[in-house]
Amino acid sequence: MNLFTFDDMKKIKRETLGDLVPLELFRSVRLIGMYQGLPMKGKNTTLTVGREIGKSMPIHTVEDALNLFEELKIGIPKILKRTDNEIHIAIEDCFCEGLPPMEGNMVCDLEGAILEGALSKIYDGKISVREIKCNVNGDEHCEYIITYS
Ligand SMILES: [Zn+2]
């Protein structure tokens, strides 16, 4: 049994500081702590962490997952293209928007892994999410390809 559920995360009782933390704190955990601080830019860790978070979420459809992505203010997902086994998703207003561009770096892998974990409950694990564009890399937006069978 899990010690914590996603539902538990919403039980917030902070009288003075409320339920939000600044984006620079989230970015610091993600980019200074994980991307920069872990071996291999945190690749294995972000995959494990993201999938685990995604699996804990109350998701039943692709739309649920995309709505939650926006609700959690990770970014605003827009479906660019949808076929029988692929969805291309652009993320507008991604948490990484505004960071200095550094070619060769795509930093939103954890967020993709969250999506993958959430959707794996619908597609019975036969799904993968790949990050193909990122603001930080100098691309016009962050983008994922979701492949499922
Ligand atoms: Zn991004």
Image (cartoon, grey):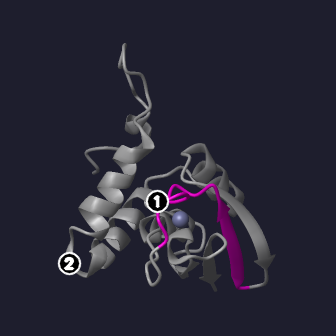
Q: Residue 131 at x, y = what percent?
A: 53, 78
In this view, which residue lies farthest toward the front? 100
Q: Residue at coordinates 32% horizontally, 78% vertically from top-left? A: 43
Given residues 142 and 19, the one toward you in this image is 142
Residue toward you, 31 or 84: 31
Instruction: Identify which residue is drawn at 43% across, 70% down.
Output: 107
Q: Is residue 25 above or below residue 52?
A: above
Q: Which residue is mark 2?
A: 39
Q: CA distance from mark 1 to mark 2?
A: 23 Å
Does the rendering let one see residue 27? yes
Residue type at mark 2: give it: Pro
Question: Would you say residue 100 sits in the magenta stretch?
Answer: yes
Corner quadrant of residue 133? bottom right
Name the side, left or right, on which 135 lies relative to 83. Answer: left
Q: Which residue is mark 1?
A: 54
Of callouts 1 and 2, the N-terminal one: 2
Residue 36 percent coordinates (x, y): 26, 69
Q: Nearer the viewer, mark 1 or mark 2?
A: 2
Question: Left or right: 62 with respect to 25?
Answer: right
Residue drawn at point x = 25 percent, y = 45 percent: 3
Mark 2 Cα-neighbour bin, 10 Å: few <14, some 14–19, many ≥20: few
